[in-house]
Amino acid sequence: MAANCNDSLTTFNKQAVWGEQCVPALRRLVSLCSIYDIPLFVTACIRNDRSGSVYVNDMVSPDIKGIVLREDHIPKHLAVMRGYDVHLPDQLGCVPEMEDMDEIFLD
């Protein structure tokens, strides 16, 4: 597990509000993106405590929609979601700039 820049832990459980408020909005967003052929990847952490973090994900895949992207970052997000470790170089510090993320994920 990667080191966190902040040793404190924020504990929360937003599972109920996620189900009641966010899921309907996300369903609408995913539906619109699918209708208009907009690739999308969404992830949210809905619970966090000493036992772990719970994430939920959804997407509109460019592959399934037949969309070819010049810079498709979605497979990188999927790899992380599926449990592949990402090892950030020490020189990037706590939060890498988005343009540095490609270097992190390259083979």
Image (spheres, rainbow, N blue to C red):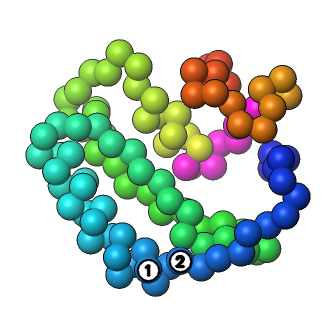
Which residue is at a point 59% across and 44% down the rendered structure image? 80
Which residue is at a point 43% across and 35% down the rendered structure image? 74
Q: Which residue is mark 2?
A: 14
Q: Is residue 57 above or below residue 21?
A: above
Bounds of the magenta span?
81-88
Residue 104 position, x and y percent, is 67, 25
Per the model, the C-alpha gap separating discs 2 and 1 is 5 Å
Q: Nearer the viewer, residue 23 or 95?
A: 95
Q: Residue furthest left?
A: 35
Side of 91 where 41 appears, left or right? left
Side of 29 where 80 appears, left or right? right
SS class of the residue under badge 2? loop
The quadrant of the rendering that contains the C terminus is top right
Callout 1, which amino acid? Answer: Val
Number of marks in the rendered image: 2
Q: Which residue is mark 1?
A: 17
Callout 2, which amino acid? Answer: Lys
Which residue is at a point 28% across and 32% down the rendered structure image? 63
Q: Is residue 36 above or below residue 102?
A: below
Residue 36 position, x and y percent, is 13, 40
Q: Is residue 32 above or below residue 49?
A: above
Side of 52 where 60 appears, left or right? left
Which residue is at a point 55% across and 49% down the rendered structure image? 81
Indicate whether residue 87 is drawn in magenta. yes
Q: Is residue 105 visible?
A: no
Q: Residue furthest top?
A: 70
Q: Is residue 23 visible?
A: yes
Residue 90 position, x and y percent, is 85, 28
Indicate whether residue 31 is drawn in magenta. no
Majority secondary structure in the magenta region: loop
Q: Are marks 2 and 1 in contact (CB under 8 Å)?
A: yes
Side of 101 where 77 appears, left or right? left
